[in-house]
Amino acid sequence: WFSEALDRALLPVFALSRLVEQLDMFATIPEEIGAAFHTGSLPFLPPEEAGGFMRRNMTGTSCSDAEKIERFNNIAATIKRGAKMEGILVNLQVAPLAVVCYAYPLVNTEDFEPPKVLNSTEIIGLDNLAESKRSASAKETIQSDGVVIAGPLTLRQCTDCDPTVKTAFIAWVTIDSLTENQVIKIDGIDHNKWGFATALINWAELVNRSDVNEKFIEKGLNYQLTRTDEVYNDQTREFESKVNILAGDEEFACDEINTESVDINTANNVWNIKVGKSEGFVPCWKKKSIAAAFVGAFIVSFMLMIICIESQSHHDLLRDMLPPKALRKIKNYKTCVEKYEIATVFFSEIVGYTAMSAEMSAIQIMKTLNEFYTELDKIADKHKVYKIQTIGDGYMVTGGVPDRCSGHHGATNVALFAIEAMEFVETFRTTDGAKVVIRAGINSGPLVAGVVGTKRPQYTVFGDTVNVAARMETTSRDMRIQCSDATCQLLRMSSSHLFFLEKRGTVAVKGKGDMNAWFIVGAADICNENDASTSLCV
């Protein structure tokens, strides 16, 4: 839950970074600012005006242009509203050359109960590379190709004030150079970077709105989520390791015997969660039971060996039919059903399958479909999507199910699979040389997945998201991949690929009315092709 919650909170800053790459108004701001302490660069404000920070004088630059400030505010406000994270996503910023240029909201009252307010006026012009407490994270961001998270930290408007944000994270996403000569020098090495986009996340509010604490309490468990950071010490002028408690119990009273500890990979950091029971997991009769278990195991081992041999063939068959997690539940006689907040579903169908099958023998049909779906299965494995089923001429895969991932990551995998599958179909021929034509449709949203049946169990997915994906396929055109608005928005957030989509307009969807639809035309690897003038959807 913690990993997924943080991933959702990071989506807006990824969207902002992509918009910076697309819009010309941001392209040349680094040239206006210039590297710190270089001739012709913007000077630093005097200490009495800088509020105790290392701030540049932004007067006369694009960062003080009222028209451009208003345009940025409109962009950031749209992203913030679309994220639907009121009270959690409290500020969005862009920092060319690591110098804060724009921030929204500049004075934030909308996310807090009066009299609390988050005033970011004095952060404009802040040079993150020159500011000692932020320089380490800023350098790490410039040197990375992804997201860097700093925190947790407490935000106050004055020294003696109550915290405006008790536990906050600052997320930085690097932005590559937008013009030929843009570089940022770190420790004598040039990096082709424009700067970065920043999001301020109210982590305490995110945890409070969830039911994660109640879940641990219901199970009678203590837990503590921590993160170890390198913190700058002003007195020693060195970085020191500091363990920060992000959620759970301030004092973790369980001993090592009754505690389980697991690392959680989140963005560029590794967090640790400890779970335990204060009264202990280990019963007092453990030693005697171990001895008895050895004796009993010796007596029944031969019987178990025979049973295991018989069940192995059954297990092997189920392993090929069901995901590992579902198989474990089935083996434990548990109902396998899971809810997924965001997943992507792909449907395809062979056009004219009835006519084609009437002209071929049953053996030819089976051979053709086997060759056809064998290749699609290879493409599905390549792009890490899961094949749900094949029914006659229909083929269905999912992204984000059963292996959970962020919404844009699952949509990216499914879209890449669909593109390569369509390229394969273009060259595929039946045994008599006939060309195969398919239609494809994709939709994203919440769904439920699980295993139905006991005699011949089948892993499948249910929900309105699945129905709309099927309608996207039936209303698509020959050799085209049609997707819904929901999938289009997730593809726009892809951090690895730039997708080219063609707006089809509205299509009539049974049970839903008119819906906007898009055709997926192709994709480019962002790492190899970074064309700031290309729109995501045309």
Image: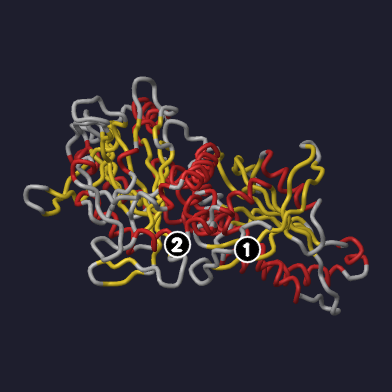
Which residue was labeled with disc 1?
Answer: 417
Question: Quadrant location of residue 182?
Answer: bottom left
Q: Looking at the picture, which amino acid does disc 1 mark?
A: Phe
In the foreground, 42 or 255? 42
Disc tally is 2
Placement of 177 over or under 452, stated as above or below: below
Q: Looking at the picture, which amino acid does disc 2 mark?
A: Thr
Q: Position of residue 525 (x, y in %)?
A: 54, 68
Which residue was labeled with disc 2?
Answer: 28
Q: Quadrant of the N terminus?
A: top left
Q: Position of residue 172 (x, y in %)?
A: 37, 52
Q: Position of residue 356 (x, y in %)?
A: 89, 67
Query: Which structural element holds mark 2?
Result: loop
In the foreground, 141 or 24? 24
Q: Which mark is residue 35?
A: none
Can residue 296 be seen in the rendering of this structure? yes
Query: Which structural element holds mark 1?
Result: helix
Mark 1 crowdedness (10 Å alpha carbons): few <14, some 14-19, many ≥20: many
Please name which of the two marks, 1 or 2, marks the residue nearer to the observer: 2
